[in-house]
Structure formats: C-alpha cells, structure tokens
Amino acid sequence: MLPHELTPASFAAYPPEARQLAVKQIALLQRLPLAFLPLLLRELIVYDWKFPAERVDLGRQFTYLGTLAPGPFQTAMSAFAQLKLARELEQTDWVNSPAIFSEKLSAHLWATHQIDAFSAAAVDYVRKASAPAGSGDDAALPTHRLGIAIIGQGIAKNDYRLFRKLRPQGVYFTQVKYAGGVQVLLNAAAARAKAHPVPYGHWYIDGGHIDDDSLAVPETVTRISYDALSALRAALQSRMQKTYEAAVFDPEAFRTMLAQIKPEEAGLNAGGDSVLNRFQLSLLTEGSGTQVFATTFVQWAAREALRRAQPLTLVTRFAPRQRENQMNELLAEHQRKPELDPQGSLIDADMGAYYAWVNQQRLPGDRKSAFLVWFEDHGEAVAIAPTLERGKRSDAPIELADLIARIA
Amino acid sequence: MRLADLRARSPQEISQAISLSRRNFLRTVTGAASAAALFGPASLRAMAVPKNRKAVVVTFGGGARDDETFMPDGQENIPHLLNELMPQATFLTNVVNQGILGHYVATASIVTGVYETFNNFAAVSPNNPTVFEYFRKDLKRPATDAWVVAPSNGFARIGESANRLYGPGLGAGVILPKRLLAAALSSASDGARYQHLLRDNYETPLYAPSLAGRQIELDQMAEVLKLSVDDFAAHARNLVSPDELSVYIVKQLMRQLSPSLLWVTLHDIDIAHSGAFSLYVDGIKRSDRLCAELWQAIQKDPEYAGNTTMFILPDFGRDSDIDSGGNGFQHHRTGDALSRTTWMMVLGPDVKQNVVVDRRVESTDLIPTLGAYFGFDARLSTGKPIAEVA
C-alpha cells in the first residue's frame, strides 16, 4: 500500500481521537512519502494517550506541513522521498503497525547506507516543524523550568569526584546545610505546582519507594517510582525470563512483543490515569535496563518525561540499584532481596543527573531554566541558573532551602 | 555553552573537533610527535616481509567513547594504554567506521575490510573474504596459524566468509570461551559460581543465536589448547569477567600453538546497554588492563617477542551526550560522529614510537594494512593500507 491509497476506512482500527485526527488530516497524509508517513502515524496512533505537550507538538507538525505551498512542501519532503525503499516495506501494514515499519525501515537504512541521509532529513524536519516553539523560547511558558536531581542515597563516604560534568555549568557548593533534605526540595516542587497548575507539568520520579508517611508529595505532582511498579516489573521479568530460556529466540520479534503489551494485560489499574499508565508501561517495555536497574529506570524516566511531557518541574531521586549479576538473576529480582551496589549507583546517578540537565536544556526555555543536583544527606551540590556564575565554587555555608529558593 | 551551539555543528565539524581534541590532549600528556614530521617517503617503500612475523588484533569493545577514554575526563580509566602502551605506539586519532554500528556486523566489516550489510543478529558468515582467508590462502598457512577468540555466541561465524573463492576450510578457528565454559559446567553442581562469566550479549541480553561455524567444542579443547576441562573450569572460577576469560584463552593459544594471526574481541564494555555508567567504565578499565597484559605476554613469549605487531582499536564509539536521538553512552544507534569516530593504537618492532597520526583513516583500512604487513593481497577489501604502520 502507498500513501495516496489511504482512505478514512484505513484508520478504522485506530483509537477514537487518533482516528478522528487522521481522517481530518487525510488529504495531507496522502501526500507524504512512505519513508516519512509511518513515522508520523507512529505518533498519531497513540494520540489518545499523549501528554498535552505532545498533542501540541503533533498539531504544530500538521500546521507546518498543511500550510506549506506545493513547492516548499516538496522541498521539505524531498530528502525523505529520495530514499530508496525495499518493496517489502511497502507491503508492511504500516498504517496499523507503524512501529514495526519503523524498525524495518531503520534496518533497511543502515544496511543500504542511507541512515545518515535519513538522520539529516529528520533533524532538518524537526528543526523547521518546531521552529515556532523554538523561536518563542521562554515566552509561552508560565515560569522557567526547574530540574532537581537527588543522588547518592545510602552512601556514607565517597571518593568519586562528583558533578564533574555539571560543575562547569554552574556553582559547586561544598557547605550545604541540608536540614529537611528531600522534603525541602519536594516543597519547592509543590509550591511551583500550586502556583502553575499545568497538567503533567510537575513530576517526581523516585528510584525506590515513595513513603507517603514521611514525605509529603501533593497530588498535583505526577509521581512515579521504581518500587510502585514492582508488580508490573515482575510480570515483565517473568515474560523475559521465559523467552531467555527458550531454545529459539528472535530479538526483534521480542521487542515488538514487549511494545505491544497493553497496560491492562500488564496489571496496571484500568480505572487509573490511562495516559500515565501507558507512559509507565513504555518505560519498562521500550527502555533498556529499566526493568532491572533502579538507576537506569530513573534516568530513562526523566529523559522520557522531559521529551514527552515537557514538565516545568522535574524532581528525580536516585536510589541504589541491584549489583550486576547474570541476567537470570537480575530478572529474578522480585523473587528475592537483591544485593545492592550503592557506590556504583552513585556513579550511575551522577551521570543520570547530567543527562537530566542535558535533556532539560533541549526544551524551549533553556536560556532561563535552572537545575540543582544534590548529594543526598551530604553538603555537596551544584546549582545552575542564568543568575549564577558558571564554573565557580562556593565554600560558604548555605541552607538547602535558601539554595533552592534562589533558583526556583 | 548551550546545547544548541553544539547541535549547530555539522557531523564533519564534530568529527574534526573530536580528533583535534584527542590529538591535542595526547600531545599534552605524552609529548607525542606528529607523524608528518617522522614519516618521510622512505617509510612508504615496499619492504621484504620477514616470514616469522606475527600480529595480534584486539578490538577494544564493544564500543567505547572518547569521553571515557582519551579525553581528559576519561584518562583515569585507561592508565595502561596512556602510560605504558602509548609511549611505544603509533596512535591514529581519526579512525572512522562508516558501516552499520552493531558489534558483530561491525567486527565482520573490520575483519573483511568491507562494510558488511547483513543483519547484526543473524547467524551468518561475512559476505566478503576475511583476513584469515587471505592470510591462509595467499601465504599457504595451516589452520592452526589463525585464530579468533570472540566474546559471544553471535560471533561463531566470524572466522570464514561465504565467498565462493575462499570460505569453508580456509578461515580461522573460532573459540567462544563462554560457550566452552557453559559446556564444561553443564554437569557441574556449582555452576552458579560461574554465572557472571556466561552473560552472552549486552545489546539484546536475551539473544541466544543458533550456532553454526568452525568454533571448537569442549571435546576439542584438550587437543587444541592442551587444557583439561577441570583446569579450565578451575581457572575460570577466579576470573571476574568474560573478557578475562577470553584473554586467558588467548594466552593459552599463544603458549600452545603460537599462531601468527590472532584476533581477540573484547566485549565487557557493552554492558553500557544496561544504562549503568559505572559498569561501562569498569568495562573500559578492565579492557585497558587486559590490553597491557596481552602486550606483556607478547614481550615475554620468545615466539612473539620482537616480531609481533599489536593493533588495538574499538569497533566503534557510542552515541554522544548531545544527539537527541540517542541516550548518551548507553547505545550506539544514532550514527552520529562520536559513535563513528574512534582510534587505533599500533605497537611493534617496526612501528614508530610515541607518534600521533592525524589524518582520517577508516576501520576497513586495517585488513589491507595487515596485508602489507604479512604480504597477502586483501583484493576485495575497499580499504587502503595505512602507510604509517603498514
């Protein structure tokens, strides 16, 4: 099937809102090249479970493509149209299974040395399609973005030079008085959530357990934790374990199987937040290492939350991961209490905090955004903000509450 | 610096910047000289090839970035490469891999000198003749003179190609240490003690390929390596990683067969796919130490000392922190400049010491370089001999 053969009936199997949008845009969809269209459909088919920011982004792409005159439209799509595709790709059910098409397309582009041309075309397209957001920069945001990363839970003594990648971006504080600790930082997030009540605009991601008795996290903050997903992880780990022990295994088919699991099949609350349920499931089915390592889970969850929901506030708290082990043992995490690796986890989290900052800086508003990374229950922190100097060190005592107040 | 500033650079500019940074850094820490100052026309003259030459190739894998190796923040992870080997080596700063960035297909591309295009996860032989086939057919060498020690079962067919003019019977023997260990443990009651050595593939940890190749099996181990199953298992118990097991087998091969062409693919680094940065760095530190151990073993072995050149190169890098299509060190999926740009270190009696070569070469140039070194013609390779080390 080729794009110009699309009809409204082609989208009969799509969820309601996705189907409605596809039918509305069908004239545009029919004009797009095959190397591009399924990638757009991959986003569209899950429209019903998209975060508001993603819906805005998809709408922006339709607006961009739909308002191009024929000449510029051809120019915008020419790099995709010039890619040479295999006949097998045309025969794929790319309307209903765009993710499978994407995997096959990726393999084809690598094998035929067209991946660089495709990447360049994709980068150029994203830059142009998102230009209105980029040029608007901070103007559309109700407040600046704030990222907070808490690392090193459970570490008493450390010899690793922390924050080596983040220190050049801000001020390295060595005498932070951390009375109130995590709660102080959560209070700052809660205050921002109250002042700017944006759906999915404020997040708290924890690599362990969110203890409601000791930590106050308001409902206005979207919450995710590694421990809260233990039942889901156990179910997935069990599936992975069976596959691992099978005599014959197709890794690509396995990935596809994981990606097609529905939240209700995985035991997520059917009556809950369906958007968040889908998001949490995707962290475990599309992420690598998120099923077995708490540090990887937090890093990937932060990346995906920033990329997809584009929150104004994101607090991440890394917890110790289990020690490296043979895959069978890692996957059996739910069956026994695993041995932990706090020191390795600190190093993982240090890099994870850097990636959280990198991913925050990809979003509109990067010139005004702020970031704090704190070594939990220790006096070390780095604060990054437009108002703070870069590459500086401060040995002056400062309260954690005062520090976060300066950048929140 | 804003991320946008970095994103605005073209891949070529970034590649050049990577090379420049690494080059400047190396010169600062080692006082290395420029190749241009040392390599005159004389070095490019054809030379008679001594018959007892040997070569050991180590792929420093799978997939290590500049950031965690030769760049300033990475130097603490590679003390042996930097302080022990670098002063004895010619170092190529700009080795580009233009092929598919999957470990098996990329290693196959290095082995054939042609960018192979098969599915990385398929149990297939390379399409083009391997270095082992050129070496054995052109130089009429016996099967015992070329060996591969490979990290995972997916490399079972790396030893010989599907090319009609070469192929079956002309390639290298392949040893898959983890497969041997698994077989050795099949009846053992304490197999759990060895489980950390049996992890097969980090990229798709659940991948278990069907095996079909010229790999040796457990019952051949005693004959080939003069190593009993009990001794093998007992030694393995004291090792911490699959790469240590591979190097142990390499040393055993050197001791028993003294092959002229020996290829070992390290792979511990690929634990990076789990997303655990500390484990990835541990893998780099271990690879660094193992490379030095191998070079020391070469210098101590009379069959190798004074007539062996060692080539060390990553199969490719990993994604940069800046490319939004990736997730930094974790994968090698974007095909960005950092993931394609690596290095090569060459040590040996005929190799200039403490020299940095700036010009761009490709990873497919290694096999024609080995051809010039040994005196065979890698006729189907698309690469060119690297004159500075050929």
Image: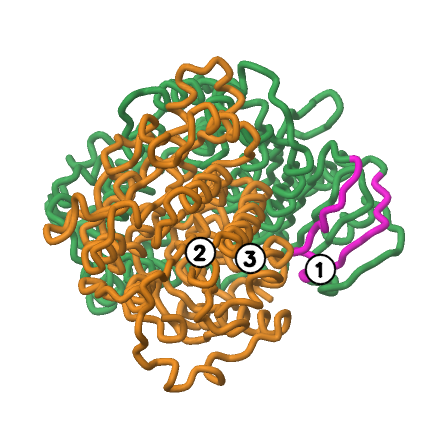
Chain colours: A green, B orange
- What kind of residue is marked 2? Tyr
Quadrant housing residue B282: top right
Residue identified by numbered label 1? A170
Where is mark 2, residue-wise? B304
Question: Which residue is at a point 46% across and 83% down the rendered structure image?
Answer: B36
The kind of secondary structure element at disc 2 is loop
> Going 37% across and 86% down the picture, which residue do you hit?
B41
| Chain of the residue displaying label 1 | A
Spot occupied by residue B274 in the image (x, y as percentages of width and height): 49, 38
Q: Amino acid at mark 1?
A: Gly
Question: Which residue is depicted at the point 72% across and 64% down?
Answer: A391
Residue B43 in which image quadrant: bottom left
Q: Amino acid at mark 3?
A: Thr
The residues tagged by marks 1 and 3 sit, at their Cα atoms, a distance apart of 25 Å
In-front residue for pair A118/A112 = A112
Q: Where is residue A292 drawn, in percent x and y?
A: 52, 28
Q: Quadrant of the N terminus of chain A?
A: top left
Q: Residues within 10 Å of mark 2 (few under 14, many from 20)?
A: many
Identity of the residue drawn at 52% across and 72% down: B353
Chain letter belonging to callout 2? B
* Residue wearing tag 3: B69
Q: Nearer the viewer, residue A27 or B363?
A: B363
In the image, which residues are magenta? A156-178
- Sooner in the amino-acid sequence: mark 2 or mark 3: 3
Q: Is the same chain shared between marks 2 and 3? A: yes
Give the vertical position of B75 relative to A318 (above or below): below
Q: CA distance from mark 1 to mark 2?
A: 52 Å
